[in-house]
Amino acid sequence: MIRVLLIFTILITTNLTSAQTTIQGIIKEVDGTTLPGANIYFDQTQIGTTSDLDGKFEIITKLTGSPNLIVDFIGFKSFAQSISLDQETIFVEIILKPSFNQLEAVTITAGAFEASDKKKSVALKPLDIVTTAGALGDVSGALQTLPGVTTVGESGRLFVRGGDDTETQTFIDGMLVPIAYTSGAPNLSVRGRFNPFIFSGTVFSVGAYSAEYGQALSSVLQLNTKELPEENKIDLSLMNIGGSAAITQLWKEGAVTATLDYINLAPYTEVITQNVNWIKPPESIDGEVSLRQKTKRNGMLKLYGKFGQSSLKLNSIDLDAPQGFSPFDIQNENLFLNTNWKSIIGNKWSVKTGASYTKNIDNIRLTDFDVKENLETGFFKLVMNNYSSDRVTVKFGSEALVQSISETIRIDTVSLSNNFKENRYSGFAEAEVYLSTKIAMRVGGRLEQSTIKHQTTIAPRFSTAYKLNDNSQLSIAYGQFYQQASKNILLKTREVSEQRADHYILNYQVNKKKRLFRAETYYKNYARLITYNSNLSAVANDGNGYAYGLDVFYKDLRTIENAQFWISYSYLNTKRKYQDYPVQAIPSFASKHSISVVYKHWMNNWNSLISCTAKYSTPRTYDDPNRMMFNDRYTKPYRSLDFSWSYLPKQHIIFYGAVTNVLGFNNQFGFQFSSQADGNGVYAQQEILPSAKRFFFVGCFLTFTKKGGANQLDTLN
């Protein structure tokens, strides 16, 4: 009897098991974009699931017959299809059609250049950003080929539409990066701290940016990191200035990448003639770890950490010193940690939250004294998005910034210290409304409160777009923007108010048959800019200024086979009174006319990608104390022709070479003057030049994977 029952139980269990069916699938839009967070269920049952971040789903059921599978997602028409459950495993691909066709709707483009593989209307792709000759592996360098950005060769930072380099803020996955550039010496170009290969998308807002972001008078650079990699791999880079190694390891729902970089320019500077009197050329070592992990309810957790050490020492121009120069030695330590989590909540909400932490230490040694600068910043953020309607999206959130900055000056055995702390709390809300497929608008505002002088600011933002026809549109935008004084000022006094800029933008764009043309005119009004005397005394908010101009951008993917090119032109008219300017004047970083041409060509017969970049900027002003007028002298125009070549003898091997300023133009970045006049009343002067007339780069980049089809082409420029 027991034996019969056992056999019967086994048969029943086998029958139940065999009756299970697994339905796997993917949810997409009409254009192929996957849809995370869609609800998938069988009609009149509680059996169902939601699609993950890649739009994929899986349902295991004991149902039989041919029940209806229902798919719902806000903004799209409900989908229903009879599924015959007569197999153990069934795969379905479901295409959802929008209830309100946002694919055909207007897109607000005023003020923003977006590089993305997912958005429907972008100026550049991520590969465009990192394969631009002359950028030298730097995102900021590539962005200097876009209109609105002035090339300031002795800085390397972003100067946007008449604003200086402090007026641009950088964010990674929405989290603040307070120290976005490497530490350097006076009048020597620096680089961005982050390798471009970790980013999948870039939004460069040159004006009137979203209410989600603040503390930037001119522009915001939003860098979005990659999601899960596709396979395990090892990347090795051998270069004439150093080397790099990276390992990527995947598991079912996550991945980790660890990278180590070492750069040493000492051998290079021994071979290539330099305009800098190096004592110890730049040397750095950086390590970074990137972790990706899918979480429940279609979430994604990202963790990123980077630690770096760098140093350099040189004889810097010092016309007050007897020999005409003095030693400058800087050693830097930088730690940046970034974590964020995003998830879909039901089919109407999404959430994104995260935090970043930065610790930066600069130890500077000069002839007569040493300086130690210490910055420590914590940044916290929460953003909610509501999709209750296919025509209205609402975004709101809050931020908190905790910052501590100190400076210690040591002269012999005497130390002088100063420091300040700031807590800043912010809230923002923004709604994007589609009145029709032809008219869209974005309305929002930002509230900030700082413990410095207990200041509160309210900044409204507005933009709208009108679709003229299937290929062209007009956009306008307005916004108020506030920014605190720089750390050098706040170390002296906290009795200063927020600086302000108002942006007005009109944009026209045509996108047709792989050709994009956009023209944008703008006006910026500056108020309450920081002013001070030459010794950083008498600090006040007495400054003001304006900037207006025209930016033109044309990109062509069609005219030349296997090639693409873009042309950028900027006209800028600006004056300001700020810092130690005695009168309102054209700032020394501004060029009235700037033009750049970028050309890239893939040569099938040679398995090569060539890239050329030509840039020209009209002369910039500088102040000569030997003359009565302020800032009335002009430099030579800036000219450069850059070239790079990527050769792939095999899919996983790349040989790469690049050279900047191929034609050897004698670029000049102004003059440095002595602080005291000689016996004849003349201030001595010395020309400010680039560190070298040209920069040469060669390297070999290897990628090892199981499939053997991956390479590092998208990490090169």
Image (tube, rainbow, N blue to C red):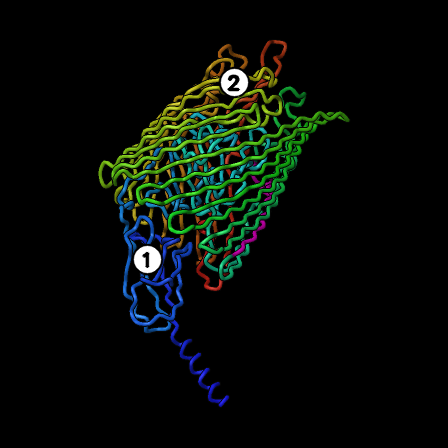
* Residue 400 position within the rendered picture, expressed as x and y whole percent measured from the top left: 54, 36
Location of residue 316 with respect to 543 vertically, above or below = below
Tell me the number on the disc at residue 359. none
In three-dimensional space, the C-alpha distance between marks 2 and 1, rounded to whole angstroms, equals 58 Å
Q: Is residue 389 left or right of residue 669?
A: left
Q: Quadrant of the C terminus?
A: top left
Proximity of marks 2 and 1: CB atoms separated by less than 8 Å: no
The mark closer to the camera, 2 or 1, is 1
- Front residue of this view, candidates 9 and 641: 9
Is residue 257 rendered magenta in the image?
A: yes
Say which quarter of the image contains residue 183. Answer: top right
* Residue 619 position within the rendered picture, expressed as x and y whole percent measured from the top left: 43, 24
Location of residue 51 with respect to 130 vertically, above or below = below
* Residue 661 position within the rendered picture, expressed as x and y whole percent measured from the top left: 46, 36
Q: Which residues are magenta?
A: 255-273
Q: Can residue 87 be seen here? A: yes
Q: Is residue 564 left or right of residue 414?
A: left
Residue lying furthest right in this view?
A: 413
Per the image, label 1 sits on a secondary structure element best described as: strand
The kind of residue on which mark 2 rests is Asn
Q: Residues within 10 Å of mark 2 (few under 14, many from 20)?
A: some
Say which quarter of the image contains residue 707. Answer: bottom left
Say which quarter of the image contains residue 68. Answer: bottom left
Q: Residues within 10 Å of mark 1 (few under 14, many from 20)?
A: many
Q: Can residue 266 be seen here? A: no
* Residue corresponding to mark 1: 71
* Residue 153 position within the rendered picture, expressed as x and y whole percent measured from the top left: 49, 31
Tell me the number on the disc at residue 541. 2
Looking at marks 2 and 1 on the same chain, the residue that comes earlier in the sequence is marked by: 1
At a point 51% along the width and 12% down the height, the residue shown is 627
Is residue 648 rendered magenta in the image?
A: no
